[in-house]
Amino acid sequence: MTTFVLVHGAWHGGWVWRDVARHLRAAGHDVLTPTLTGLGERAHLLAPQVGIALHAQDIRAVLEWEELEDVVLAGHSYGALPAALACDHPAVARFVSVDGVPIVPGRALADRLSPEAVEAARATLVNGLGLPAPDPVVFDVPADHPGHAWVKRRVTPLPWRCVHDALPALPPRFAQLPRAYLAAGRNSMAEPARGRAQAETEGWPLKVIDSGHDLPVTAPAETAHALAELAQA
């Protein structure tokens, strides 16, 4: 049996892991799927200070208060960033990036955008704090997929600091942990593609699923199976 802590990505919440968690639990694993501050059912907590550093604190708090040990910590998409920071907690035994963005200290997600694109995005912010969610097709959930409407109902604005804050220095433990990458073979998003390239360059164990980027939605059984395999890689 393995204990998994699954961290969602941008605009999502712990809800996105519903079907993945069901498959993992059926196989005998323990699974926690926390929602990061300011997102999902915690969207009412959106505030100026909510960003990557606070989201890492969210994850550490779950590890601490649930008194977990020997955890496989997995972060999907943006969630790979705060999950990597939370690897300083001694409960984390293994890290998995699930179609995650590149993990580069000192770099912000907005750094690859032009100043014009950043200002255009800033102009759309909800209450000056949250970037509105795009249609789920952007996450590779097609309009005719059964999960499309489900995702569209649940996505919430992304705290702006998550986009423009640079990733802080990684804890030394991160480099010492076993790390792996679970890739969506039909991902269409640029940053996860760069995250996969980084993992391949660094020689992380890699598994590829025939799915678009939002693989917890479009390939939950395959995602659960791959996570269980990577937990032993």
Image: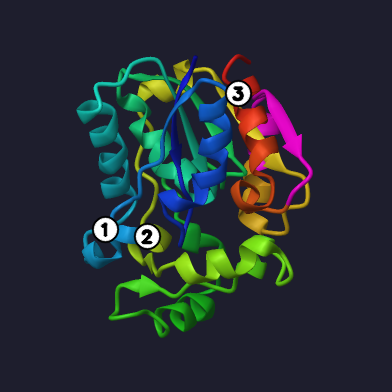
Which quadrant of the figure has residue 38?
Answer: bottom left
Tag 2 residue: 40
Q: Is residue 170 magenta?
A: no
| Rendered image coloring scheme | rainbow
Residue 79: x, y in percent? 46, 46
Q: Residues within 10 Å of mark 1 (few under 14, many from 20)?
A: many
**Label 3 to label 2: alpha-carbon separation:** 26 Å
Kind of residue sitting beneath label 3: Ala
Tag 3 residue: 228
Kind of residue sitting beneath label 1: Val
Kind of residue sitting beneath label 2: Gly
In the image, residue 218 above or below residue 30: below
Tag 1 residue: 50
**Dot 1 and dot 3 residues touching (CB under 8 Å):** no
Q: Secondary structure at mark 3?
A: helix
Query: What's drawn in magenta, residue-wise?
Result: 196-211
Image quarter where the C terminus lies is top right
Q: Residues within 10 Å of mark 3 (few under 14, many from 20)?
A: some
Q: Is residue 199 magenta?
A: yes
Residue 203: x, y in percent? 68, 24
Residue visible at 55% across and 73% down in the picture: 134
Could you tell me if residue 197 is visible in this image? no
Which quadrant of the figure has residue 113?
Answer: bottom right
Closer to viewer: mark 1 or mark 2:
2
Residue visible at 61% across and 33% down in the picture: 224
Q: Nearer the viewer, residue 28 or 82?
A: 28
In the image, residue 157 above or below residue 59: below
